[in-house]
Amino acid sequence: MVLAGVGMLASAVMVLSSQIQLPELVAPDLNETTFICTSEVVGTCSRDVATATLSAVEDRELVTFDQIPPVLWQAVVAAEDKDFFEHEGVDPYGIARALYQDIRFGGNQGGSTITQQYVKNSFLTNERTLTRKIREATLAIKLEREAVDKAAGKQQILQDYLNLIYFGRGAYGIQAASQAYFGKNVEQLSLADSAYLAGLIRAPESADARDNPEEAERRRATVLRRMLEDGYITELEADRADKRTLNTIIAPISRVGLGRVKGAEFGSEYFVEAVRQELAQLYPDGGLYTDGLRVYTTLDHELQRHAYQTVVNELPPEDPDNPTASIVAVDERGRVVAMMAGTDFGVSEVNLALGRDGGGSGRQPGSAFKTFAFAESLEQGFSARSLYSAPSVIEIPGANSGGVWRVKGGGSSNGYRDLVDALRVSSNVVFAQLMIDTHPGQVVQMAQKLGVTAELPAVPALVLGAGEVSVLDMASAYSTFEREGVYEAPVLIERIENAEGQVLCWYPVNGECASGPERPGTPVLDPQIARQVNYGLTQVVESGTGRAAQFGQPAAGKTGTTQDARDAWFVGFTCDLTAAVWMGYPGAPGEPLRTMSDFRGIEVHGGDYPAEMWAEFMSRAAEYRGVVAAESGEDLALAPSCTELPTSDNFTGRVRNPQLSTTTTMVPTCTPAPPPAEGEPPPAGAVPPVDCTPEGPPADEIPVDQIPEQPATTSP
C-alpha cells in the first residue's frame, strides 16, 4: 500500500505538473534585522558588536554557507533529510519511510525534503491540499535541476533554507537563532549546540530548553543518534555532546520597545531611540526594520558613561527631591558623542536633551543666550570694548509689550562696563541695552544660523533667556563658536550601509543625506568675530560667573539661570569638544515647574552645579581623548591636538558712545559715565563720576563684588 501510494504520487507529479502554472523561482527578498553600532566599532557592524537591533516580525541576519560550521548543516541534514545530497528535490524513499513510521509508531514524521521545505516557505502557501503538495514537489525538482553545478546548487539551497526557517524566540535563520539561544555567532556553535538547534526546526516553541528541558534533551539526543547513524560523528562525540548541560542556553531577550540595548545602564536607550526616529524619516515605509541596515552612529560609549556618571553622582535619581540634568557633547565635526538624556528609559521615554522633539518641553536658556547677542553686536560693527552704563537697575520704556521693561542685575561700582566685561559677569542691565541696539529679530537670526533650531520670540527679554531651546541646540550653537564660525549640523549617524557593506547614506539630518564622507561645514560667522566671542567666553571661565568650570585646560563657556532658578545651564567648549549641561526639574504635564530656589540650602545658578558638572565631564573626556598626560607621567598621544583655544583680544569695530541712551532710564539716578582720557574734556552730556554701589546680585550666579573688576578701555 505504501509503495502504491508513492507511485501514485510520482505519477500525479508527472501528469499534473504540466497543467499547473508554476511561479518564477526567484529567491525571496527576506526581511533582515538592522544593527545599530557605536563609534568604537571599526569593522563590520554585526549582531555581536551592535548596541541595538531593529526588526519587525522576523529577526534575521543572513550568513553564507562558508560561515556555517559543517557540524551544524550535518545536524540539520541528519534530522530533516538524510538523503539530501542524493535526491533531486523529492525523495520517494523518504516519503515511504515517513509513511511507514507514521503507520507503525504514530505521529507525524513528515516526508518533505529540505528542498521541498524551502520551496514551500519561499514560493507557496501553507494550505494542506494535494495541488499545493504537487506544486511543491514539482518546484523542488525544477529548482535542483536548474543548478549548473549540483554540489554548489545543494549548498546554495541548504544556505538559503537555514537563512529562512524559524527557530523560535522570534529568530528567523540560523544566525539569529544562534544569538537567541547561545548569545554567539553561528561560526562558534559546537556539536551539542548544533544538535539542539536542529531539533527545534519541526516545532521550536515546544522544545525551548528554558520551558521544556526534557523535550529539548530528547530532541537533541535524537539528532545526535541520527548523525551517528549517518557517519557524521563518532559514538564518543555523540556521548559527550549528549551529556552537555542545557544551562548554557540563555534566557529569551525581550523584544518589547527597543529590546536589549548595550549601555542601557548609562542611558544609551535615549540616543538609540533618537537614531530610530532619524531612520524612520529616511525609511518611512518601514525599511529600517526589514532592510538589514548597518547603522554606524556617532555615540562614544565611554563618553556616554562619563556623562551619565557625572549627573547621577551629583544628583542620585533615587532621591525623589533631586532635580535632574542633561549633558550633550558634540565634537569638532558636529558628531554627537554623548547624550545623557534621562536616567531610566523604562520609567520615562522623554528625551531631556531634545526638548520638544524628545517628547518634553523646551527649556529657557537664561543668560546663556547673551552670547548670541554679543556675536550679533560684533557682526553689526560694534566693538567688544564698547561701553554701556551699568547701574543696578534700568527701565526701558516700550520694551515690555509696549510697557516699561525693568531690568536689574550686573551693575558696576564704576557705573559702566564694556561688552567683554558685561559678558564675564553676565550683566543683565548691559545686555538689555545691547538687545535694544542690535534688535531682537537680528539676534534671533544669529542664534538660528549658529545652530538653534527652536522657534524663538523676537522680543527684548530673549537676551535674558525668554525663549525655549533644547540642550542639543545649545551644544550645537556653541560648537559653531568653537569652529570659529563654521556651522555643522549635529548628527547622530555617521553612515548607513546595506548588508553587503555598500554605503547608502552619509550623515543624515532630518531625513536628508550628505553627499559624501567629508563635512566641510557652512561658514556663518566671520572667523575674526568668532575669535572675539571666544575670548569673551574664556573670560567668563577665567574670572567671571563660570569659574567653577575650570578644570586645568583652556576652556570657554557661559552660565545661564532663569527666573526663580527653574533652569540652570553651563555651555562651553575646549578646542575640540563642546558640551551643554542643563539642570532642573522635568515637571509633569500640566503642572508648574518646580524651582531650585532652595536646593541643598542654596538657590541653584549656572555657575555652581552645572558648571561643576561640566568641568567634571570635560576633565574625564579630556583624559579619555588623550588630551592630558596620564597620571603615570607617560605622555598620551594628542589626537586631535588640543593645546589652546582659538581666542583673540584684538578687537575691531566702532566703539559705542558711552552717553546714556535717550530711551533708557537708569534707576537709581547714580549713573556715572567713564572718566575722559587725561587732558581731554568730558564728552557732552556725561554725568560726573559719583560713588555708586549697585544693589543686589548681578544677573547671574555670584555677586558682582566677588568678581574682580577688569579695567575698561575705550580703545578698539
Image (cartoon, helix red, strand yellow):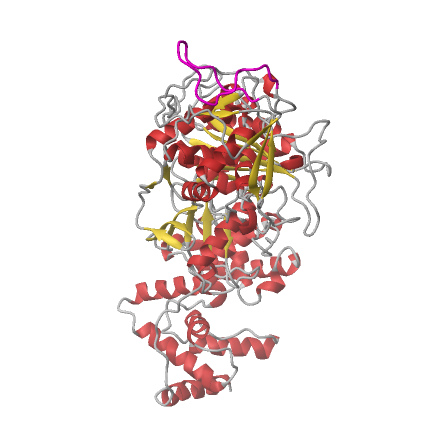
42 on left or right of 692: left
Q: Residue furthest top?
A: 679
Between residue 86 and residue 687, name the one nearer to us.
Answer: 687
Between residue 58 and residue 72, name the one nearer to us.
Answer: 58
Task: Please say if 205 is above or below 486.
Answer: below
36 on left or right of 323: left
Q: Position of residue 405 (x, y in %)?
A: 59, 38
Q: Quadrant of residue 670?
A: top right
Q: Residue furthest front?
A: 684
Q: Main secondary structure of the magenta part?
A: loop
Q: Position of residue 260 (x, y in %)?
A: 57, 49
630 on left or right of 202: left
Residue 692 falls inside the magenta stretch: yes
Q: In this orientation, does residue 617 appear?
A: no
**Range covered by the magenta-colored residues:** 671-693
Residue 98 falls inside the magenta stretch: no
Q: Position of residue 146 (x, y in %)?
A: 29, 73
